[in-house]
Amino acid sequence: MGFKLEHIADSTEPSTSDENWLAQTLQKEITFFGKFFGNKKKEDFYSELGVLLKAGISLKEALSLIQGNQKKEKLQIFFGEIVDSLISGNSLFEILSERKEFSEYEYHSVKIGEETGTLSKIVEELGLFYARKNEQRRALISALTYPTIILLTAILVVIFMLKMVVPMFEDIFRQNNVDLPSITKIIVSISAFIEDYGALIIGIFFLLFITLQLIKNNVSFKKRRDSLMMKIPYVGNFIKSVYLTQFTQAVALLTASKVPLLNSIQLVEKMIDFYPLREALMKIESQVLIGQSLSHSMSQIKIFDNKMVSLVKVAEETNQTEYIFQRLNEQYAIEVQQKSKMLSTLMEPLIIILVGLFVGVILVSMYLPMFKLSSVIGG
């Protein structure tokens, strides 16, 4: 985004245009079929607003500065509408609550900040929340990018061998009437299938991709998808840690703003976009409403580990909820970083081994008939 104090601070340092381009590219949030005001822009918005408010600038002037520094016309109009609504007498909370780009968690946090005179702190914390969320997303992408590239390259190599190399051997074997082993017949059949239906398979995958994009916000689909992801070995635990990090950070922010614990859970429940955790929070809410303690309610649900349950129990006994959830957030953030590195480390050799097996099977299936062919030619 436009107004960034770190840009001013760094303006005296020499840098090449290539380095600037690379830095900007890495910071961009690339979305397909996504929102124009995504998490990266929210991080920038709240961080910049927090800095400006702490510097003593009024809310209207701060929003006008942010608007004036937007490069895209759509964002200029977006912030212009917010400024106009603010001038009309609406509070920032009311403005955010009327716009679909902002979640209930965000505008309730802002409302608390306006009512308690701590708006600068609240928006700063929201900036940190989205910064951590984006950092976790980048960690996941970083962990999966290299293995995915290897996997796609391997798939292309295997398809090339099945489409180009196998038919050449098949012609030689057919011309010399060589009796093919079972494994070679299977590979030849797969090669013929790809030759006949390859374009159809690509078309099906493309339609599947488009369909998934269109239904990705469907509640039933999201529940099934999240439930399936939780069952994937290691990946499921990694994703759970990511959302537990978001949960602990959100509760720490709300309790720091003196929001009652039950209300904090209700707000976080609407903010979390991961249904196993959202359903767990709904169960906790119902248990707390009938008088159960938070730690006891959490202990009945598998998604919360013993470490979290024990520390939450300590928080209840010592009235240190904000502090405990901040510590939990730091621990889960470190855990996410470690698991993302481990995920990448584990996937790379597994994919290489898998690819080696596929290529090895194809080569062996092609070379086995060569022994019979040599005997036919020798005879």
Image: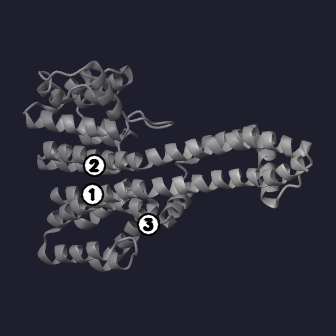
Disc number placed over residue 300 in the picture, else none: none
Say whether disc 2 or disc 3 marks the residue closer to the N-terminus. 2
Residue ID for mark 2 = 132
Task: Write the residue at 47% across / 48% down.
Answer: 147
Of residues 11 and 282, the one nearer the viewer is 11
Viewer-closest of 164 and 148: 164
Q: Is residue 261 above or below residue 173?
A: below
Q: Say which quarter of the image contains residue 52.
A: top left
Q: Residues within 10 Å of mark 1 (few under 14, many from 20)?
A: many
Mark earlier in primary sequence (1, 2): 2
Q: Is residue 40 above or below residue 112?
A: above
Asked if the residues shown at circle 1 and circle 2 are in contact, with their CB atoms under 8 angstroms apart, the answer is yes
Q: Amino acid at mark 1?
A: Ala
283 to the left or right of 91: right
Q: Quadrant of residue 155?
A: top right
Q: Are marks 1 and 3 in contact (CB under 8 Å)?
A: no
Q: Report the disc number at residue 333.
A: 1
> Which residue in the structure is indicated by mark 3?
279
